[in-house]
Amino acid sequence: MADVDLEALVKDMGKAALPFLKAGAARAREYGKAEADKMARTAVLLAKGVAAGTIDEDEANLVLDVQRNASRSILLTIKGLGIVSVEKAINAAMEVLRKGIEAATGVVL
Amino acid sequence: MGQDQSGAFSWLRRSARAMACVVATACLAFPGCAVRLIADHDEIVVAKTVALQEKAEALFLALEDAAATPDPDDDLYAAHAGAYNEILVLLRVMEVRAASLSKNEITTEQVQLLRDSFEKMKALHQKKSAAATPGGFSAEALQALRQAFVQQVQSILTLQEELRR
């Protein structure tokens, strides 16, 4: 059995995982920004409506409740995007490890 | 300070080795099997979310039309009760489906939040319709509400799209 260079293997695993983590962070940032813009537009509509008297107090409270739910749902999506990117990173690292073990042992996993 | 740093690096190296050993064991124990931390894409939830979006848009359109006409009766809850109930039935079905899948807590919570939004909208519509001067939603309120609802629907679809992997 060939020797396994553990330091090099760990480094390669990190290299394989990193692009997925970076891509996940970029995707979450892009999505979060687009949704924040939409929330701001809703807030402007609400403020204008309340100021003009075309949106009453009950309606304003309902819009705020629904917007709060939308914000939580968006945060859940961002959490999900993060989990998916971590999952992809782990699987990429495991693939490097699998190949390393195969190369060292000659056993196909 | 130098000793502290070298201790920390040594601890990191040991941790990395330990983690590699754990992953190696997992690799050897389950060859070819990928780690899954969150549920897979669910075509049924996607189809029901799209169906829900159609029904919700139909309700918003009907409410917007009603708000634009002088007839007060078409603004009232009774004229739209069927649409609310259809939407809530769909959301309950989606919730049961989402909750039945493993590692699907995020989608389940998103559907629950959407149901909560529609239940609150229905309750306020009922309250307004039963008031001393019965009425419905204003056009401006409907516009703001629709934007927030659409964001909720899109958040579910965005996550599902990502879960296709």
Image: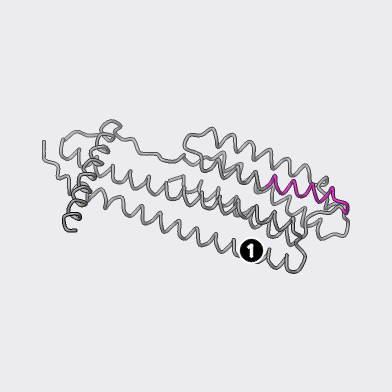
**Residue at image x 54%, y 40%?**
B43
| Disc 1: host chain | A
- A47 left or right, relative to B107: right
Rendered location of residue A104, percent (x, y): 15, 39
Residue A21 placed where, x, y %? Answer: 36, 53
Left or right of B47, for residue B118: right
Q: Is residue B109 above or below residue A23?
A: above
Amino acid under disc 1: Ala
Q: Nearer the viewer, residue B40 or B141?
A: B141
**Disc 1 target residue:** A43
Task: Find residue B4 and report its horizontal and vertical position in percent.
Answer: 19, 54
Q: From the viewer's perspective, is residue A92 above or below residue A36?
A: above
* Magenta span main SS: helix
Q: Is residue B141 left or right of residue A7?
A: right
Q: Residue furthest top?
A: B29
Please name the residue shown 74% across and 58% down the image: A57
Task: Tell me the crowding category of disc 1: few under 14, some 14 to 19, or many 20 or more residues within 10 angstroms, Cα based.
Answer: some
**Residue drawn at point x = 37 percent, y = 47 percent:** A86
Which residue of the protein is positioned furthest toward the left in this rendering? A2
Q: Quadrant of residue B109?
A: top right
Residue B70 vertical position relative to residue B98 in the rendered view, above or below: below
The mark total stands at 1
Quadrant where the image shows the N terminus of chain B = bottom left
Mark 1 lies on a secondary structure that is helix
In the rendered image, residue A80 lying in the magenta stretch gets the answer: no
Magenta-colored span: B118-133
Q: Position of residue B85 (x, y in %)?
A: 73, 40
Image color mode: one colour
Residue at the image position 75 percent from the left and 69 percent from the top: A52
